[in-house]
Amino acid sequence: MSNYHIKHLEEYYQVYRKSVRNPEAFWEEIAEEHFVWRKRWDNVLSWDFKKPEIKWFEGAKLNITENCLDRHLPTRGDKTAIIFEPNDPKEEALHITYRELHERVCRMANVLLGHGVKKGDRVCIYLPMIPELSVALLACARIGAIHSVVFAGFSSHALATRINDSDCKIVITSDGSFRGSKSIDLKGIVDKALEGCPGVANVLVAKRTNAKIDMLKGRDKWLQPLLDEAYADCVAEIMDAEDPLFILYTSGSTGTPKGMVHTTAGYMVYSAYTFKNVFQYTENDVYWCTADIGWITGHSYIVYGPLANGATTLMFEGVPSYPDYGRFWDVVEKHKVNQFYTAPTAIRALAKENLDYVEKHDLSSLKVLGSVGEPINEEAWHWYNNNVGKKNSPIVDTWWQTETGGIMITPIPYVTPTTPTYATLPFIGIQPALMDENGQEIKGNQVDGRLCIKFPWPSISRTIWGNHDRYRDTYFSAYENMYFTGDGALRDAVGYYRITGRVDDVIIVSGHNLGTAPIEDSINEHPAVAESAIVGFPHDVKGNALYGYVILKETGESRDRENLRKEINQQITEHVGPIAKLDKIQFVSGLPKTRSGKIMRRILRKIASNDTSNLGDTSTLLNPEVVQEIMDNAL
Ligand code: 7RM
């Protein structure tokens, strides 16, 4: 992509207005200017949110790996594409150039072809954060196979469900994975999953831990010898703009996980264009996103977005606490990271620890800090800003979803003045709307409602794999002609958006709509509190009352609990109002979190309502043990 960046807020508004006045002309220009196409599109956009059917760049032909790899070879062949930072800091980091990455992708693509994988086939990828993971995604894209990455922290049951839902015929995995001081038997998990997956013909196994594993004859093969033998070039399959690129599962509040389908051209254009502008990436920067590639954040902002820009993207195999809580900052210093993108849950975990872990490292390379995944509470925002950014690196609080494919609401660093807890302004081309319960759009500022998007953007997911009806019902039936996000938001006096949490988390207390985020924020401001979550429970008079689960900092452990409860409610009264005071406050050692770091409020809600006979699907929980503790001490 060209090196031009938006430089002033006025310019942002100008480009924004242009992008919504004539979206087709706007995106056509971006597509023309920044990418290589085998054939030009016949039509920029056709859409109908009723069916729903959305098509971008119809008629165009391309291969996304030619945009991420081949076209960089003449100018950036020797530039580092991927820095691999292993779990163990004593193991050497790898610098993989664009030329090397191209070769590795081609070899892997040829191995897949050799195993009968054809255009349109689904390939399940269940790998730790090692280079083979990025290579596997791109190898699928090279030959037009549809990748379905399953985060390598999911159980065998969760893996089997996902393999079967999309009929994957092949699985790429590894002997094991390193996570801090632990190593995990990934191949054993795959073997167990495959007992219930008759459609899988082959398992390709990368070597990482050297653990002794079982190899099933005829089905399982070591990957490396196959790669060594494979030809180092592979002709790219020419894809239609709307051919599926990947499936990625996201869990809904009910039912089986939804296999969100992303297609080729629109996803490429939007992930690359947002990457460039949201992180203000310039040539020779080193960019690091700490997410796992098992989540959409990793797909769009570790692999496709950065590589389409010819960027250097860092892949980190480890965890923030190993060998100690300074690891993130050690990696930033070691590789002179310029843009750093992480999640509020990681920030809060690190903010609990001694500041020395941050302060002993030279973080002067940092220019932009990012946050994604949940509302970032005010205290975490300030900690990040003061201690990591030294008040010199703007924080981009980026709101988006698996379904949106790319960042939707975000500041542009050095352009949009930031306000803690506000994702601020819609990205270029994005037309948000706030809706009331009666299906009317709420216009004007200083209002809140349910967050919808009025107009398609290039990377909106096109369907749920195998279930288009569910796609329509989930996203396009709540409000006519709108994509419904499932989130609540408010728009302040200057038009900034603040995401208040999932709408299913909104609690109505005595007729007042309360979002969870602002209340949790005010609780977390209390000096003794590390983290909190609130839910509603039925109340005779108020309809619902609030139940708070609070994790104390070590310094708070010795304090009198009754006094703490009073102080917390005092704090809420001052910040949000007396209506938001908590009826019950339970002190806990942890909160049930999904593997992507989101609090599973559904479980907390059941415990608060004393309805624990059936907690529902807990297979995506990272820390199931904490649930028992919370139930045992429930108020
Ligand atoms: C990228 C990702 C999507 C849900 C989304 C929100 C929440 C994500 C923010 C946020 C407040 C943010 N995809 N969410 N980012 N809430 N501020 N900056 O996380 O599909 O896994 O989750 O995450 O509720 O709907 S996701």
Image (cartoon, grey):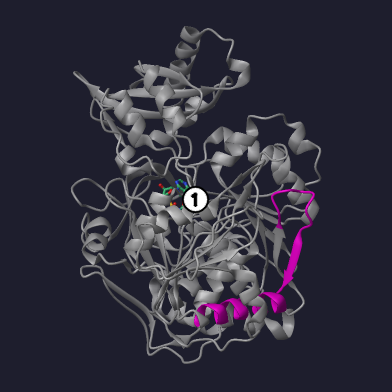
Up-down relation of residue 39 to residue 370 (above or below): below
Indicate left or right for 613 with 432 as reference: left
Indicate the position of residue 415 as horizontal and vertical percent values. Answer: 61, 57
Residue 365 in the image: state x and y as whole percent: 77, 53
Q: Residue furthest front?
A: 217
Above or below: residue 56 compared with residue 627: below
Location of mark 1 (residue) = 424
Q: Is residue 414 left or right of residue 552?
A: right
Asked if residue 112 lies in the magenta stretch, the reply is: yes
* Quarter of the image with the C terminus in it: top left
* Residue displayed at 62% across by 53% down: 212
Type of residue at label 1?
Answer: Thr
Query: Regarding mark 1 in the picture, which secondary structure is present there?
Result: loop
* Residue 183 included in the magenta stretch of the image: no
Work out which residue is located at the far bottom of the displayed protein and give it: 39
Residue 13: x, y in percent? Answer: 50, 63
Residue 399 position, x and y percent, is: 47, 52
Where does the magenta region start and end? 85-113
Q: Residue at x 45, y 77 (%)?
A: 145
Measuring 39% from the left and 51% from the top, which residue is drawn there? 158
- Binning the other alpha carbons within 10 Å of mark 1 as few (below 14), some (14 to 19) or many (20 upward) gives many
Front residue of 176/363: it is 176
Depth order, front residue of 182/244: 182
Q: Please tell me which residue lies in front, 232 or 141.
A: 232
Say whether residue 107 is visible. yes
